[in-house]
Image (cartoon, grey):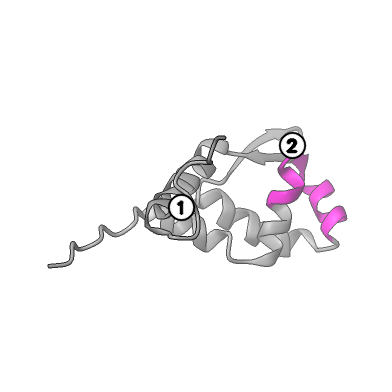
């Protein structure tokens, strides 16, 4: 009898859904090295603030971004612990894959 798989947590589902949009991936890439304000993100991505706000909201609701307000600007950075949750979920597949070793081979 086959063991039934547990469904992923809602944070995993919401996290991967948030990362399913190319513009959101670009936002994550830009925030990889530094915190940026909305104005900088708009300029680097070539999008309007209203369009970007929708995507930032999705990423923030998924727990992938943190924000802080300074004056009239909101600054965004990655919430790395949530990325660890997604990474741990994916790492579970290594033990089922005949292609990828569970651990790197050492000589």
Q: Quadrant of the C terminus?
A: top right
Q: Which mark is residue 35?
A: 2
**Residue sitting at x 51%, y 36%:** 81
Would you say 60 lies left or right of 45 here? Answer: left
Compared to 102, does 51 lie above or below? below
Real-space Cα separation, disc 2 to disc 1, in angstroms = 26 Å
Q: Position of residue 102 (x, y in %)?
A: 44, 46
- Where is residue 8? Give x, y as percent: 34, 56
Majority secondary structure of magenta residues = helix
* Mark 2: few/some/many CA within 10 Å (<14, 14-19, 20+): some
Q: Residue furthest top?
A: 70
Judging depth in this view, the residue of 38 and 16 nearest the camera is: 16
Answer whether residue 37 is magenta in the image.
yes
Residue at coordinates 76% horizontally, 58% vertically from top-left?
49
Q: Which residue is mark 1?
A: 90
Residue extent of the magenta highlight: 28-45
SS type, badge 2: loop
């Amino acid at each position: 009898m086959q063991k039934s798989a547990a469904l992923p947590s809602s944070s995993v589902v919401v996290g991967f859904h948030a990362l399913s949009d190319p513009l959101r991936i670009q936002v994550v890439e830009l925030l990889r090295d530094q915190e940026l304000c909305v104005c900088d993100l708009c300029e680097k991505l070539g999008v309007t603030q209203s369009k970007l706000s929708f995507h930032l909201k999705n990423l923030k609701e998924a727990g992938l971004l943190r924000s802080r307000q300074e004056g009239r600007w909101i600054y965004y950075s990655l919430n790395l612990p949530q990325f660890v949750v997604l990474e741990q979920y994916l790492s579970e597949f290594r033990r089922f894959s005949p292609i990828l070793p569970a651990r790197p081979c050492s000589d």
